[in-house]
């Protein structure tokens, strides 16, 4: 069988950069394969995709050596339009991909460009809408849809052109866990039933492996660091060495002293051979002791009997009641459209409740303006494009300080400090437009952190981040929380984040609060997880398969072990010049794929 994509000794350097982003790439992908591409930000993953779909060199000019063929064509000669008939790309930021005023118009866009007769066009749009299950959404505006629905519309828009290759750039970044599972299911179904070649770029490795992939390609510093099966990769140390998060159950097995072997098929915890590990996992569980519960503290924020509706008679939030203590680090979780972001907008004063109270430090803030609340509460929104207003990175992060009249010398010092923490200092003089979606997220986090708020609300703070930047941001937030006592509330779909960094989770489903409990209890409770579109942690499955009855206790011990023993070991490694991800400490950061 002839390859459908083939790189031979391929090197590419962007025109504006001194060093190549891709170096001596040798990679072959065959028709019908499903390949997962992983790697840290700046490794060249996005550039690899841009080479395949023709964006390089037409949208991103530069110099290339070696050869690249896609279905026997050279993308550099075929052009973007020619490649669009072979390769369809579903972007991470789906909002940047919509053109039509309705879903039907957007899906039909490529057909209209090809002057397809209207009757045929209608039939093709309906057929592809059925494939991705959006038939009932065709009359809607794309802006009205949830993250998962938008993604399916984008998929329909590329499938309708009957392309041979589908590229997915971080398909899970903005989706709740259950919707993410459905997305991976749908991608798998399309690959199998429509004989498409599928390439997925994703930071959330464990979630991406929910369905089988043929191979995983690891990109590190512009080179192919590994090209092997999932079982072979999980049994190696390549993920740790390249700064990529392992599946949680693999990490737990290693903590227990087990050897993860390819022949035990570790790709799925449900079917992995654990015969040689069960006793060790049980012993480890019994050895780890949990600390005493923390004493109660004063209230930082309290929500009492809160109701809200955008349209009268259609409640978005009903009878929401919870209390957040000073210095707490808490997660708010639930499916897309559950009302989590609406809740944060009510707290910040962008919306006003129909009923109920919001107390800040014990006092009702109903009469406080957005500006007054903003002096105490900082909000980092999910979509960075909705927050950024300045063309240059430094000016964007400095904006809030300058508005408040802070001296320019102090502005510079504080902005540089936060840019370093967020991994953006090398880009301090860059335009925002040159950044990836994930890097824009870090710009918005830096612009709020620079204001030194008492309460920080972050809507999906780690979406699109690789493990190293995820860890840097979360460790910094943890440091702020512990050393300065800043109360941190995170609205997230990342179950790893909730487990690793928070002691409590508020779960919202269908506008109601259905749980206020520890992350371990939430992610081992099937009814709560199912109703809120969460995903039971793989640690639960590991505990059950090893015969541990107290699955929640096992998860809690894993979290405590990670926060104390494992993190202490990682920090000692960093002090010796090696970071947690195995890279040299202080290593220069480069932009994602640029």
Image (cartoon, grey):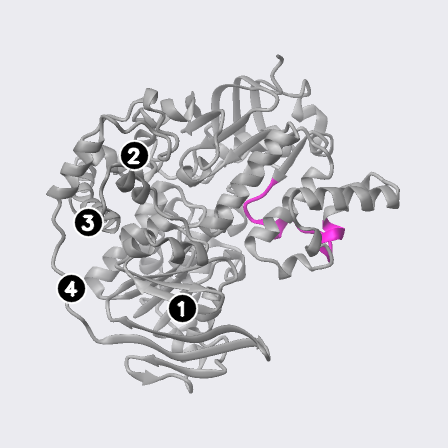
How far apart marks 2 and 3 lie (CA) works out to: 17 Å
- CB under 8 Å between discs 1 and 4: no
How far apart marks 3 and 4 lie (CA) works out to: 13 Å
Earlier residue among tags 3 and 4: 4
Q: Is residue 552 magenta?
A: no
Residue 93 x, y percent position in the rendering? 56, 49
Q: For mark 3, what is the residue?
A: 560
- CB under 8 Å between discs 2 and 4: no
- Count residues near mark 1 (Cα–Cα under 10 Å), then give few for <14, some for 14-19, many for 20+: many
Can residue 577 be seen in the rendering of this structure?
no
Of all residues shown, which one is farthest toward the bottom?
367
Q: Could you tell me which secondary element the residue under label 4 belongs to?
A: loop
Q: Could you tell me which secondary element the residue under label 3 belongs to?
A: helix
Up-down: is 265 above or below 131? above
Q: For mark 1, what is the residue?
A: 513
Q: For mark 4, what is the residue?
A: 294
Residue 50 x, y percent position in the rendering? 58, 33
Q: Could you tell me which secondary element the residue under label 1 belongs to?
A: strand
Q: Nearer the viewer, mark 1 or mark 3?
A: 1
């Amino acid at each position: 069988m002839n390859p459908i994509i083939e790189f031979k000794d391929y090197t590419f350097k962007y025109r504006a950069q001194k060093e190549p982003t891709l170096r001596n790439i040798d990679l072959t992908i065959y028709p019908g394969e499903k390949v997962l591409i992983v790697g840290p930000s700046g490794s060249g993953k996005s550039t690899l995709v841009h080479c395949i779909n023709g964006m390089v060199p037409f949208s991103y000019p530069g110099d290339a050596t070696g050869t690249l063929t896609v279905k026997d064509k050279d993308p550099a000669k075929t052009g973007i339009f020619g490649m669009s008939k072979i390769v369809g790309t579903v972007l991470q930021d789906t909002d940047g991909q919509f053109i039509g005023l309705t879903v039907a118009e957007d899906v039909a866009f490529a057909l209209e460009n090809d002057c397809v007769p209207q009757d045929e066009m209608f039939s093709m749009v309906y057929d592809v809408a059925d494939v991705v299950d959006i038939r009932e959404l065709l009359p809607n505006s794309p802006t009205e849809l949830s993250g998962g629905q938008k993604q399916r519309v984008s998929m329909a828009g590329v499938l309708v052109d009957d392309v041979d290759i589908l590229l997915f750039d971080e398909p899970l970044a903005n989706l709740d866990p259950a919707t993410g599972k459905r997305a991976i299911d749908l991608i798998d179904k399309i690959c199998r039933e429509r004989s498409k070649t599928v390439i997925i770029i994703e930071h959330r490795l464990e979630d991406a492996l929910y369905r089988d992939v043929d191979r995983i390609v690891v990109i590190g510093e512009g080179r192919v660091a590994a090209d092997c099966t999932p079982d072979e990769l999980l049994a190696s140390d390549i993920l740790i060495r390249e700064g990529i998060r392992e599946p949680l159950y693999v990490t737990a097995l290693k903590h227990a002293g087990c050897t993860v072997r390819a022949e035990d098929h570790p790709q799925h915890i449900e079917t992995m051979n654990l015969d040689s590990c069960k006793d060790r996992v049980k012993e480890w569980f019994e050895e780890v002791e949990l600390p005493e519960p923390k004493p109660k503290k004063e209230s930082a924020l309290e929500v009492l009997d809160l109701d809200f509706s955008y349209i009268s008679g259609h409640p978005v939030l009903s009878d929401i009641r919870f209390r957040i203590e000073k210095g707490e680090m808490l997660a708010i979780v639930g499916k897309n459209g559950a009302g989590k972001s609406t809740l944060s907008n009510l707290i910040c004063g962008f919306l006003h409740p129909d009923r109920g109270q919001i107390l800040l430090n014990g006092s009702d803030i109903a009469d406080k303006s957005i500006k007054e609340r903003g002096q105490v509460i900082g909000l980092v929104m999910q979509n960075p494009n909705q927050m950024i207003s300045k063309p240059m990175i430094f000016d964007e992060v400095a904006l809030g300080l300058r508005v408040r009249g802070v001296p320019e010398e102090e502005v510079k010092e504080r902005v540089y400090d936060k840019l370093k923490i967020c991994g953006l200092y090398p880009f301090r003089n860059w335009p925002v437009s040159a950044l990836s979606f994930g890097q824009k997220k870090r710009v918005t986090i830096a612009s709020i952190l620079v204001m030194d708020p008492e309460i920080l609300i972050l809507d999906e703070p780690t979406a699109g981040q690789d493990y190293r930047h995820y860890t840097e941001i979360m460790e910094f937030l943890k440091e702020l929380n512990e050393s300065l006592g800043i109360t941190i509330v995170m609205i997230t779909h990342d179950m790893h984040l909730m487990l690793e960094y928070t002691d409590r989770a508020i779960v919202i489903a269908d506008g109601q609060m259905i749980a206020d409990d520890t992350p371990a209890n939430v992610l081992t409770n099937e009814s709560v997880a199912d109703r809120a579109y969460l995903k039971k942690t793989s640690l639960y499955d590991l505990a059950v398969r090893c015969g541990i009855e107290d699955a929640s206790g096992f998860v809690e011990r894993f979290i405590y072990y990670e926060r104390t023993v494992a993190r202490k070991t990682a920090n000692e490694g960093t002090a010796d010049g090696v970071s947690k991800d195995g890279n040299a400490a202080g290593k220069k950061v480069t932009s994602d794929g640029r």
